[in-house]
Image: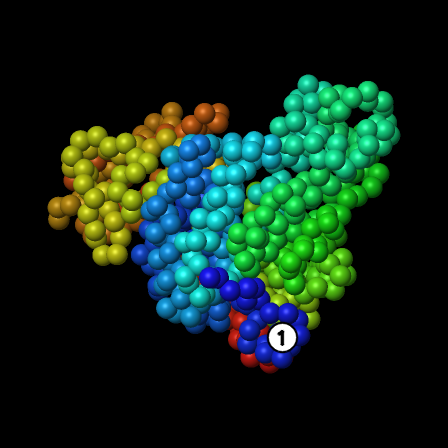
Amino acid sequence: MVAGVVIPSAEARAASPSQVERAAYYFGDANPINFWNSDLSGASAAFQQMKSNGFNAVEFVVPWGEFQEGISPQTYNQTSFKRLASLVSVANSQHLQVILRLSYGLDIDPKDQDTDRFETVFSNQAVYNAWLAYISKVHQSVARFPNVKVAQLSWEDFYEPVQAAQVASTISTRLQLAVSTGFRSWAQGTYPLSKISSMYGTTFNSWSQVPTPSNSSPSFKLMYQFDDWDVVHRFFLPAAARFPGLNLEARVDVDALYSGTKVVGSYSHADTFQVPGTNYIGMYFAPYMGDPSTTLAETAQQGLTALQITLSTMRKRSGNRPLFIFEYEFVSNSPQEATNPGLGPSQVSQFIAGSEPILKKYTIGYALWAYRDYTVSPLFNASFSLGTSGWTTTGTTRIVPIGRQSYLSLAEGASAEQTFQPTYLASSSAHEITVSLSAEPVTGSSSTLKVQLGSSAARYVTVRPGAGSYEVQFPASAITGNSGGQLSVTAEGPVDLSDVQVYTFTQVGDVYDTNGNPEVAATAVQALNQRLASGATS
């Protein structure tokens, strides 16, 4: 049986500082959306490196759609469950605690039979029952391991009703959403119809007339209130009964309320800050939060001020409960945050060093999101560690092991092709798309690969003797629309192929680069972890 919450109370932390959690997410040599179908053979070495850097825990995302591929009937991806158990076992052998982010919302598994599950789970009982069964199944698969005592849900993965309502522009769409999201049922059980009419500024004669509120009206606070209630009562509490040690990453940001285009108020998601049955509050942080700077170049001191303000505010709002930062980002270069202030490379180490007393005062630990930089590639089974699953091959091909990596061996004229969703290419504004791959000629002489992406003209890669990494660029116009991108690789001479990536964007964390080389923050993170573990002050 999985034990209770491993993260200690503030009092226990003070008495035993060595118990402070210092976690890092692990995505292998891949990224969050294709982690579980990637090459995981380097996990042991990666965990050893994490330990040497002062981490005492590792966190994994556990995508609902990839682990439970079918809803009706409920079917499970046994390979993913075996891989989860294997990674947990490796971590346990190295005395690392494991944190699981359950119900992660992104996956590219081609066998996922219900890609709109995060939309229908709010009102479809069969989908909801399947979600609960998935939570139970994950718990059963890790219950025997003593190092799995903490898991989390995140508000991000249950925000679909709010996002859909924000962009709904017609009454007919809003009426449909009121039913499909479960909003109307919640409103009917929470307020009398007369109160709802008053809040909307109109008169409803029956509940069937009530749509989701307009995002340009102050009444939209009802949508936030509904989603917070749903996250806590419909999802978190039932899941916590099935997975002891579960906590919630609450939404820290305050949302603006509008009257037309004018901001007339704000909504704080405080209902998620004191979740029943928990003794600490989960949250996230990046230095731009709480920083009112108008410049994109943020100093270390501005970032530390933002950290102090955000954590102290959250402590007050949570009834003085200790905090755990489930998603900690020293830097964030994602396209969604491109307009936010950010720390420059020269400021990162100073920020990390200065964060120590603030973290000690307000938190009982953190989980670093971008421990290792990663390209955001939407290819499934990019390193062929699952054979040819997700790929269509022609000609003579076979899977061969070379070192710790799997390769697809292509005979002359053979090819491998995959169709993917362009929406997973992180930056729609990019001018170029990069295709990178690892390859080695089967014979002792050079060979050639023909690489075709979407509608663009083919590129040719000369593969020289010995294992090597190669990349070619395509114009962004090679892929148009969201119906599906297509990549094909054809061997004009015998070649072993692996680690194929298609991307426009690399997520950086300034700790280790995509090849595992230390970056500007590596030494500072190691020093921070050592001080947090020892209780020493800087």
Asked if residue 215 lies left or right of residue 399, the reply is right
23 shown above or below 449: below
Residue under numbered circle 1 = 12
> Residue sitting at 48 percent across and 27 percent down?
482
Q: Nearer the viewer, residue 292 or 268?
A: 268
Q: Nearer the viewer, residue 526 or 297?
A: 526
Residue 357 at least partly seen: no
Please provide percent x and percent y for residue 477: 45, 28
> Residue sitting at 42 percent across and 63 percent down?
145
Q: Nearer the viewer, residue 300 or 233?
A: 233
- Residue type (three-letter) at the residue carrying disc 1: Ala
> Residue sitting at 52 percent across and 33 percent down?
126
Please provide percent x and percent y for residue 330: 58, 59
Please provide percent x and percent y for residue 234: 63, 43
Helix, strand or loop under label 1: helix
Asked if residue 247 lies left or right of residue 190, the reply is left
